[in-house]
Amino acid sequence: MELKQVTVLLLVTLILPGCQGSVSLGATIFGITGAALYASFDKLRCTFYECCSPKSDWIKPNITALNNALDTHLHGQHLVRDVVSRALLGHLSNNDPAKALVMSFHGWTGGGKNYVAKFIAESIYKLGMRSQYVHIFVSTVHFPHEQQADIYKLHLQDWIRGNVSKCERSLFIFDEIDKMPLGMINGIKPFIDYHESIDKVDFRKSIFVFLSNTGGPDITREMLQLWRSGRKREEVSLKDLEHLVERGAFNEKGGLHKSELIQFSLVDHYVPFLPLERRHVELCAHDEIRRRGFTSSKELIKKVADELMYFPPENQLFSTTGCKKVAQKVSYIIANVQYDELFD
Ligand SMILES: *[C@@H]1O[C@H](CO)[C@@H](O)[C@H](O)[C@H]1NC(C)=O
Ligand SMILES: *[C@@H]1O[C@H](CO)[C@@H](O)[C@H](O)[C@H]1NC(C)=O
């Protein structure tokens, strides 16, 4: 109902009872007006404050935007782009999904796992990571004590239930899930299982993303082998890495290890992040230099890449820290360049 109509209704309510003395008619109209006013206020509130309503534009999933972000800012992870983009499109475009979407990201440090989680949030919520519907849990920060696992588990269940009842389209990101106290993760199971609703709360539209380094060494070993046999990185397919999932490489001790999520196949997608090569680190350096407002040059990029370490020793193929330390190294190099310009 538009504001103008509400005003007219309001005027009618004020005038009518006086003219006809009909109290009940007045009360009825007043009731209708009240509801209309409330609806308008709600709509008005949604224009200024984030709200969950699918009619407002605070939650507007945009897969094109996600693909663009991944194409421009995520380097060396062709498998990730494909899986994540397809999985989200499938889940978001289905008005009646069978269960919550659960993706588990695995791989070497600095491969871009947190980055992709951020892009997902930005492609769904106008406020991105700042949205009140995005929840991040870092195991070492939120659940540091193994012996309190039972209490954490109850809190976490309350939070998930509370937050999803506020908004069905909620995003939960669990960082360092491999460091979560043993058994705690099973507390999430009811929410991501195939239930229509639990206590009238429907969890099927929510999204869970797990991040961990588990499987990193196995992925790397596999990539080295493929590289030695002459396979191009870009030609490696998900199928080439599938046996790692079957072998349980992504579920080594901690986190998902022995969890019911695995047992009941509740994880929809295992997403392998490949170890980054020097050329990818250089792309990250290029992005970072530009982000700081400086002109990127081959020389500057080389300086940043030289600051990092590579392995294995015989061919130095992969960066030990991926793109993780690039921002820090860029700061250091730019400061050095500025120092030389000032004092040399
Ligand atoms: C989705 O994102 C793309 C790229 O950022 C933009 O051009 C497009 O207008 C967006 N679509 C909607 C419906 O907002
Ligand atoms: C939602 O989750 C946050 C943690 O991200 C928690 O602090 C808050 O209490 C939860 N809200 C509800 C209503 O449960």
Image (tube, grey):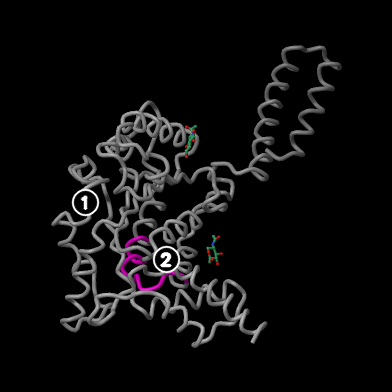
* Horizontal and vertical percent position of residue 51: 58, 41
Q: Quadrant of residue 151?
A: top left
* Horizontal and vertical percent position of residue 220: 23, 69
* Horizontal and vertical percent position of residue 19: 86, 17
Given the image, on which type of amino acid does mark 1 rest? Asn
**Chain-order first, disc 2 or disc 1:** 1
In this view, the residue in front, 101 or 179, is 179
- Within 10 Å of the Cα at label 1, are there few (<14), some (14-19), or many (20+) other Cα atoms? many
Q: Quadrant of the N terminus?
A: top right
- Within 10 Å of the Cα at label 2, are there few (<14), some (14-19), or many (20+) other Cα atoms? some
Q: Indicate the secondary structure of the residue bearing disc 1.
A: helix
Circle 2 or circle 1, nearest the eye: 2
Q: Indicate the secondary structure of the residue bearing disc 2.
A: loop
Q: Residue at x 37, y 26 (%)?
A: 199
Q: Residue at x 29, y 39 (%)?
A: 181
Q: Main secondary structure of the magenta part?
A: helix
Q: Quadrant of the C terminus?
A: bottom right
Does the magenta-highlighted stretch encompass residue 81? yes
Q: Which residue is mark 2?
A: 324
- What label does residue 334 carry, if any? none
Tell me the CA gap for discs 2 and 1. Answer: 23 Å
Q: Which residue is mark 1?
A: 251
In this view, the residue in front, 26 or 217, is 217
- Report ligand 1 position as a quadrant: bottom right
Above-or-below relation of 169 to 115: above
Given the image, on which type of amino acid does mark 2 rest? Lys
Q: Is residue 321 left or right of residue 254?
A: right
Image: magenta residue range: 73-84
Q: Quadrant of residue 309?
A: bottom left
Above-or-below relation of 99 to 119: above
* Horizontal and vertical percent position of residue 22: 78, 12
Q: Residue at x 17, y 81 (%)?
A: 228
